[in-house]
Amino acid sequence: MRFDVLTLFPELFAPFIEAGIARRAYASGQIVLKLWNPRDFAEGNYRRVDDRPFGGGPGMVMMAEPLARCLQAAQADRAQAQAGEAPVVLFSPIGAALNHAAVERWSAGAGAILICGRYEGIDQRFIDRHVTHQVSLGDFVLSGGEIAALALLDAVARLQPGVLNDEGSHQLDSFNPAVDGLLDCPHYTRPEEWDGQRVPPELLSGHHAQIERWRREQRLALTARHRPDLVASARAQGGLSRADEAVLAQLGEAARAGL
Ligand code: SAH
């Protein structure tokens, strides 16, 4: 799949695609990433990409024309590379917050053209003409869309086959609806005792079934405590066994008893 990113700060991307496990998705060509700077498509000696807002007020607004030319170049390049029809995604507080389901959809497609806003945002006429999707990282304001783009790319990269060392490892990560959509269990590594705290004995037992049971109980307990909504949707989708329900019932009783 191919992602094209329109950004005034392409240099922010290199460290993330060159480090860590996500790098494998780029090195293997599973994800092709092309960076485009609207400034290269701006006119005049100053290659201006922003201007003052009509109606006054603070800050600057990204001009439509350099962005439109930049987008056209990215689209033409994609067409030449037969990279597939790409949605045009703007990162914006307007969009729905990125979540696992959306990441799975993006990782199953042909990629996208990702547009990173800066300043007060982008001239609305460009958005009305070209943007097909808006994606938010959450209910807070970033100074630019780059971190949101990197968050999407990173989450998509780790879902690509072979990117994680252990194929199964993202299966048990939090939010995976193919498993149960619950939160992940806690993890421990050496030493067995640290700062007066011991690793739960179940994990040291060497009994595969006991370990699996402990992890399952932890997933259920953590999710029931921190994200009861995810337990409810797992139940609605038939993702909870009778053993799971028994664990949850016990947890409920313990909570009611103030344990
Ligand atoms: N004036 C805008 C914020 C502009 S911030 C407002 O109040 O809604 C500059 C750019 O950062 C935006 O154009 C957008 O691309 C990006 N951005 C800011 N917050 C974001 C968020 N929560 N999710 C995704 N992108 C965001």
Image (cartoon, rainbow, N blue to C red):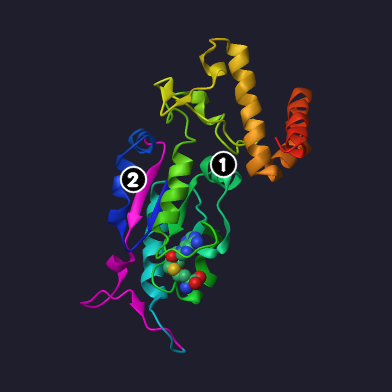
Is 87 magenta? The answer is no
Residue 1 in sight here: no
Which is nearer the N-term, disc 1 or disc 2?
Answer: 2
Residue 151: where, in percent of width, then height?
45, 49
The answer to which quarter of the image holds residue 180 is top right
| Amino acid under disc 2 | Phe
Residue 97: where, in percent of width, then height?
57, 56
Is 46 magenta? The answer is yes
Q: Secondary structure at mark 1?
A: helix
Please identify the quadrant where the N terminus is shown.
Answer: top left
Residue picked out by circle 2:
16
Residue 114: where, in percent of width, then height?
45, 56
The residue depicted at 44 percent of the width and 87 percent of the height is 54
> Which of the labelled discs sits on residue 104, or is there none?
1
> Which of the labelled discs sits on residue 237, or is there none?
none
The residue depicted at 54 percent of the width and 22 percent of the height is 200
Q: Which residues are magenta?
A: 29-54
Check the image and name the residue furthest to the left: 45
Q: Is residue 206 left or right of residue 8?
A: right
Q: Are marks 1 and 2 in contact (CB under 8 Å)?
A: no
